[in-house]
Image (cartoon, rainbow, N blue to C red):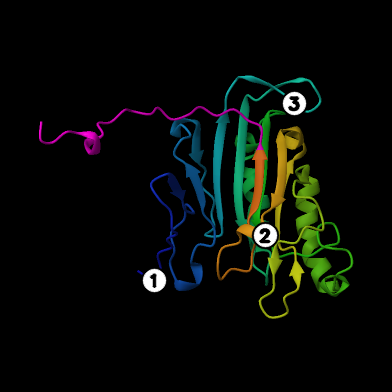
Amino acid sequence: DPKTFKTRSNSRFTVIYPSVSSSSLQERARSAILVNNRINSNCWQQIPFPSRDVTVIQFNLSQEGIPSFRNEQSLTQGTLTLVNIYNDCNHSNTLSQLNSWIRTHRATVLQNEHSHMFWCGDFNRHHPLWDDSRDTHLFTTQALAAARELLTLLARYNMIMALPGAIPTLEHSRTKKWSRPDNVFCTDSAEDLVIRCETGPALRPVCTDHVPIFISILVSLPKATVHERRNFRMANWET
């Protein structure tokens, strides 16, 4: 079915698609999240979002205390909400929906100081805050005006940039120039939980222009129970 969005995966991951169905070819999903099956499925859930361009899951963090980088005891109880976003180049409808969604679900995603949130994805916005400041051709009046709505949301919900600025994430296929349409933002309460956030240009898949972003977060999640199974390849069938 051409209206159905599917992505490649394997048995080690559970694929989370947007929670709303498609009604036309123009509404194909442009967002998905893959969750490792080694994580206990009881500690996370999908949260509905009214767009085919956004996928949201929320992790319930354990009560274990882990040391933070400030040598304090950081309790990781609470929640971690992961929002995968694709924001269109030609409009900011997704950002407007994100703002309305957070206002409606604030009690779920931002309950207290132990509630953390991450925005990851392709925002298609250029600004000197994250792009290379020397790429002045990106900072047109129109581009800066389009980025203003994103900056307003970041300030409104106390979001900071997890991926350091001036690190490119896309190589344009024609010009071979680099830019930074992709980003990772997190609430300031999660700053101490971010161990690293960097790109992996050497691991860019074939025939793609975006490079992968790797982020490690210091949280404790329960593992799924592993059930032992018979290994029939080891059987002595003659016996």
Callout 2 environment at 10 Å: few (<14), some (14 to 19), or many (20+)? some
Task: Choose top left, top right, bottom left or bottom right for residue 177.
Answer: bottom right
Q: Secondary structure at mark 2?
A: helix
Q: CA distance from mark 3 to mark 2?
A: 29 Å
- Majority secondary structure in the magenta region: loop
User: Mark 3 = which residue?
Assistant: 68
User: Mark 1 = which residue?
Assistant: 2
Left or right? Give the position of 123 relative to 50. right
Question: Count of labels shown?
Answer: 3
Label 3 or label 2, whichever comes before in sequence order = 3
Q: Out of 201 and 125, give the one closest to the viewer.
A: 201
Q: Secondary structure at mark 3?
A: loop
Start-end of magenta stretch? 217-239
From what the image shows, is residue 72 above or below residue 22?
above
From what the image shows, is residue 42 above or below residue 213?
above
Label 1 or label 2, whichever comes before in sequence order = 1
Label 3 or label 1, whichever comes before in sequence order = 1
